[in-house]
Amino acid sequence: MVVSNQNKHGIYFISDIHFGLQSEDEERLKLDRLERLFALIKQDGRSLFMLGDILDYWMEFRHVIPKGFSRLICLLSDLVRSDVEVFYVAGNHDFYLGSFFERELGIQTRYGMNNFEYAGRKFLYAHGDGLGDGDLGYKFFARFVRNRFNLALLTAFHSDLAISLMKRLSYLSRHHKPVDIPKESNRLLNFAESIAAEREFDYFVCGHNHAKGEHLLANGKSRYINLGTWIDGRYPYGVFMHGEFHLKELQR
């Protein structure tokens, strides 16, 4: 994929906002900050990559849109209508995005690890769930949740019951933690190192483990970037512009 169009130069990245998880006040703060970020993107951004867990849970029905995300949906629709390309990678909480985001909002949905080139730079991007060695339990869990037959069963339930079940699955996903926490914190960094030994890229951008940071990999050229999370009162995002990648934060 090659990022296209416009005279704007910014490529923006966010992840792990987890809308629907926190109190009403905290949710409102996150939406206010997202609206502020989208205003910046409209000025100089050509693309936004949402790298998973933007929603803490999502269940798509044929005739029902889950309650609680109206303002977010309006903000996303407005951003797309402002001629910004928006990509949404499913995470381990917004398990399966269905067709609503593409058909109704014009957002391009993705799963797993993807890539694009822009301004002579090669980007790999993913949420981060299921990548690398180990954590077989989660990998089985993800296959179970995204299986089309199981999704059909879930959507056959009454919407209130199905959404309650999705919230429960989101809770289980959050509390599924390996015994060795330091190993889990380094898993995505180690995965990026292994990929850098096999193929050329400039940036591996992800989220998932909420460990915001940037690391130069062993080859001395590629960089690992983790976007962090919005659930701890901070509002980080990444932007690539004029040949440089920066991790930034919106102020409270």
Image (tube, rainbow, N blue to C red):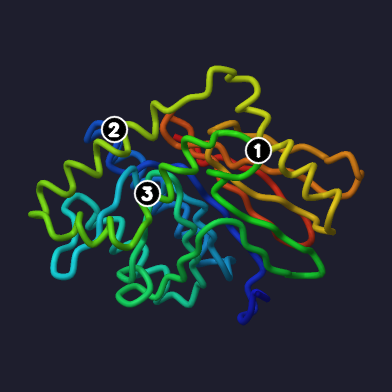
- Above-or-below relation of 198 to 24: below
Q: Quadrant of residue 82?
A: bottom left
Left or right: 101 with respect to 39?
A: left
Specify whether 213 is left or right of 143: right
**Residue at 79% over, 44% down:** 194
Distance from disc 3 to disc 1, alpha carbons, whole Å, reads: 19 Å
Quarter of the figure with residue 70: bottom left
Horizontal side of 163 relative to 109 (left or right) equals: left
Q: Which residue is mark 1?
A: 133
Residue designated by label 3: 144
Return the mark for residue 22: 2
Q: Secondary structure at mark 3?
A: helix
Percent x, y for residue 155? 18, 59
* Residue 122 spot, x, y in % from top left: 77, 63
Residue kind at label 3, given as amino acid type: Phe
Dot 3 or dot 2: first in sequence order is 2
Task: Name the mark nearer the viewer: 3 or 2.
Answer: 3
- Judging from the image, what secondary structure is the residue with disc 2 in? loop
Residue at x 25%, y 55% (from the top left corner): 59
For marks 1 and 2, the one nearer the N-term is 2
**Vertical order, 48 against 235 (above or below):** below
Q: Are marks 3 and 1 in contact (CB under 8 Å)?
A: no
- What amino acid is labelled 2 in the image? Gln
Q: Is residue 236 left or right of residue 105?
A: right
Residue at image position (65%, 74%) is: 3
